[in-house]
Amino acid sequence: MPHWARSASCPTGTLPTAVYELTVSGDYYFDDFLAQGGASNDSELISFVTKSITKGLIPLQLKTTDISCSAFTADTAEGDRVFGRNYDFSSTNTAIVYTNPGKGRHASYSTVDLHFLSLDPDKDVEGLGHKLLTLAAPYAPLDGINDAGVACGIFMSYQGDGKGTSTDIDTDKPDLTSTTLLRLILDYADSVEDAVALVEQYDLHDSTNCVFHYMVADSTGRSAILEWVGSDADHDSDGSQRRLNVLWNDTDSLSDSADWQVVTNFIKTPDYYTSPDQMHGLDRYEHLADRLRETNGIVADEDAAMALLAEVGRRTWNNDDSNSLTVHSAVYNLTDKTVRWATSTTARMGIHSATACKSKFSKRTKTGAAPVWRAQLLFSFAFFFFYFITAPRFALVT
């Protein structure tokens, strides 16, 4: 069984948070989750995950908070389509998660902020209880790519009163929360058009006091930004009245060309704002757009795409909020179906094939050295019991 390939380690001092690698082998009950109608809030999602995955043995909480991110699509000089993304937040621990659920669903790589699973960012993931909490990781992706070359990401959009009025659509459609919408795309979408068609079948329910929009792209050069909006920024305080608007790369009024598309943290739907001052992350957006406009949407290679992300990384950019750290940067090659993943805007961490499979759950040290621990024998025996007695269709490969 092939493992994830690894490139240069991060220099000492450039990795302020820990990075874990997690392989989820087999089913994680997402089909069952959709069959029951999904979830209309975090409590319903927690109830399902606790019942289906941890079997009630480990209590689970989901946390969300403000995040400020940037992303773009472009072509390399060799013609590969890439999707670059910065995830900006305060200090946290991260997991690179590989899933291969079978049953005709796509294998994928995704990035999960372990803070969302209520794991303390100031502590290592140690002990059986903490590790079992990571079994919920497939339900909390922030960005990712599947083996069809479809990539997606989630971004704060700061809408409504206090800029945090959650989207909360209530029709007769089944329901999805923010991160389970990304899981739907990663598991089932063969293309951007397919992703949009899937999303249109569900009502979206953002987590409390958070509101998001999404970007999805594929290897054909097609991309789209998915936004749930009211009439305009001054009349968008009722999340139940929002409706999905899709901005395709060839109809996005803020993009000069279908060759590239950019998203940060403001709504791109035309005529939504009355003033540029309302547009969160406009400075980062304009920098990325200007750079891509200069090159007709072409970056030399994946290194150049990563360097462009570094230009708007929060270590070097003027920060106007608490998200003073670019936790990770990812360049997804939608043609080759690979991801180059970096822990900060200064050093590459690895290139991982989206069709590969790894077999260990390991952690890099905060200096970027080789993994410093493997799952202990006690955990192996405990999880062996958990797997065969309580969760026969779910395995964590250690």
Image (cartoon, grey):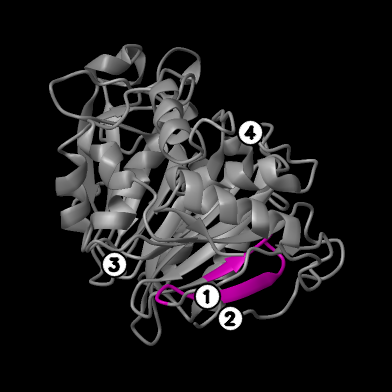
- In this view, which residue lies farthest toward the bottom? 78
Q: Are marks 1 and 2 in contact (CB under 8 Å)?
A: yes
Q: Is residue 289 visible?
A: no
- The CA distance from mark 2 to mark 4 is 29 Å
Q: Quadrant of residue 338?
A: bottom left
Quadrant assignment for the C terminus:
bottom right
Q: On the picture, is 227 further left or further right than 16? A: left
Residue at 42 percent across and 17 percent down: it is: 165
Q: Is residue 53 above or below residue 79?
A: above
Residue type (three-letter) at the residue carrying disc 1: His
Q: Position of residue 106 (x, y in %)?
A: 30, 64
Residue ID at (66%, 33%)? 320
Residue of label 1: 352
Of circles 4 and 1, the one toward us is 4
Q: Assess whether residue 269 is covered by the magenta stretch.
A: no
Tag 3: amino acid: Asp
Tell me which label, 2 or 3, sits earlier in the chain. 2
Residue 292 horizontal/vertical position (percent): 42, 65
Q: Nearer the viewer, residue 199 or 225?
A: 199
Residue at image point 18% right, 46% down: 198
Q: Which residue is mark 4?
A: 118
Q: Earlier in the sequence, mark 1 or mark 3?
A: 3
- In three-dimensional space, the C-alpha distance between marks 1 and 2, rounded to whole angstroms, equals 6 Å
Residue 237 visible at all? yes
Q: Considering depth in this image, is 104 or 296 the residue closer to the camera?
A: 104
The crowding category of the residue bearing disc 3, from other C-alpha atoms within 10 Å (few below 14, some 14 to 19, many at least 20), is many
Q: The residue under label 2 is which amino acid type?
A: Ala
